[in-house]
Amino acid sequence: MEKISVIVPCYNEEKALPLFYEELSKNIKNFPSEVEFEILFVDDGSKDKTLKLIKDLQEKNHNIKYISFSRNFGKEAAIFAGLENASGDYVTLMDADLQDPPSLLLKMYETVTQENYDAVGTRRVDRTGEPVIRSFFARMFYKLINKMTSFEMVDGARDYVFMKRVVVDSIISLKEYNRYSKGLFSFVGFKVRWLEYKNIQRVAGETKWSFFKLTKYALEGITAFSTTPLIVSSIIGLLFCVVSFLLILLIIFKTLILGDPTSGWPSLVCIIFMVSGIQLFSLGIIGQYLSKTYLEVKQRPIYIVREKNF
Ligand code: UDP
Ligand code: MG
């Protein structure tokens, strides 16, 4: 017998969950009979009836496991809890809103078992239905982060991945507090095949990501996987030192040769503004890394469990 664990992070998904479960169950039936399933719902501190719905499903289907958090810890924490508690030989992560089509599961399973891949990732080839500005910034983000990291982050990659046990174990072994799953998945490497599909709209309920939250998430991704911004700010600092040194030489030269007509106040103000702006910007970058280090050093748990059924 082989076992597949399906991890489903859920936060206020009472509308989407029944539809999701129905669709998943349909697809599970297509699997060969020697494959056993475990569905692990991670309730990320939902404030609606999500947990109750999960419990009802569990009464009917004993392959369902659930963990419920003491409050909302975020999707990354839910993913981590799922990976830690999944017992399958293969593990997959799926959103509860059917944006990660369960119909791909069989293909993912076959790819890993028959084609000598360790994991299968998925990526959206388009972003239809998404606000234009959001797509634009998302593309910029991937361009930027790929210049800054030594491994590839795939544009449009989703958290919907199918992994062998080795891959799961290596991701769990990364215990960092600031988790950026797509980065962690790229970081561990292995032989990954990417499946592509067209963007699918959420079946019901609402997205939990505002533009502000996404921006924060993007900055987290960058600071978690790259120290390039620190280097860039040092280089800019150095550059400005050199420029100001040259300017000083120029001013001395001008004063000695041409006398000193007092002028240049407006340009001086501009320079002060610009240089202090750059200083604040660099300090901000350092602050970002410092705050991340601060959170890591405290070694707080990534999630806190309120109840579970196993
Ligand atoms: N989610 C979660 N905790 C959160 C936010 C989201 O567990 O704090 C789950 C959510 O229930 C869903 C998945 O993460 O199953 C993706 O969330 P969503 O659909 O809102 O994100 P989007 O697809 O819009 O990026
Ligand atoms: Mg979604």
Image (tube, rainbow, N blue to C red):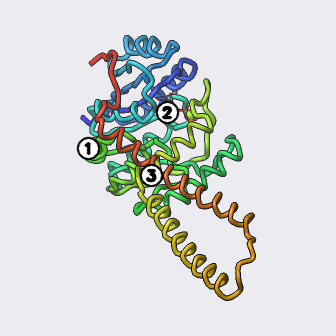
Q: Say whether residue 89 is left or right of residue 265.
A: left
Q: Amino acid at mark 1?
A: Ser
The verdict on label 2 being within 8 Å of ligand 1 is: yes
Badge 3 is on which residue? 286
Horizontal and vertical percent position of residue 105: 44, 40
Q: Residues within 10 Å of mark 1 (few under 14, many from 20)?
A: few
Disc nearer the start of the sequence (2/3):
2
Mark 2 or 1, which is nearer the eye?
A: 1
Q: Which mark is residue 51?
A: none
297 and 54: which is toward the camera? 297
Is 295 located above or below residue 272 in the figure? Answer: above
Q: Residues within 10 Å of mark 3 (few under 14, many from 20)?
A: some
Q: Secondary structure at mark 3?
A: helix
Q: Which mark is residue 173?
A: 1
Q: Secondary structure at mark 1?
A: loop
Disc nearer the start of the sequence (2/1):
2
Horizontal and vertical percent position of residue 32: 35, 36
56 and 69: which is toward the camera? 69
Badge 2 is on which residue? 95
Whole-number angstrom distance, CA of label 3 to CA of label 1: 27 Å
Horizontal and vertical percent position of residue 292: 39, 43
Q: Secondary structure at mark 2?
A: loop
Q: At x 52% / y 37%, what residue is drawn?
A: 101
Q: Amino acid at mark 3?
A: Ile
Whole-number angstrom distance, CA of label 2 to CA of label 3: 34 Å
Whether residue 120 is visible? no
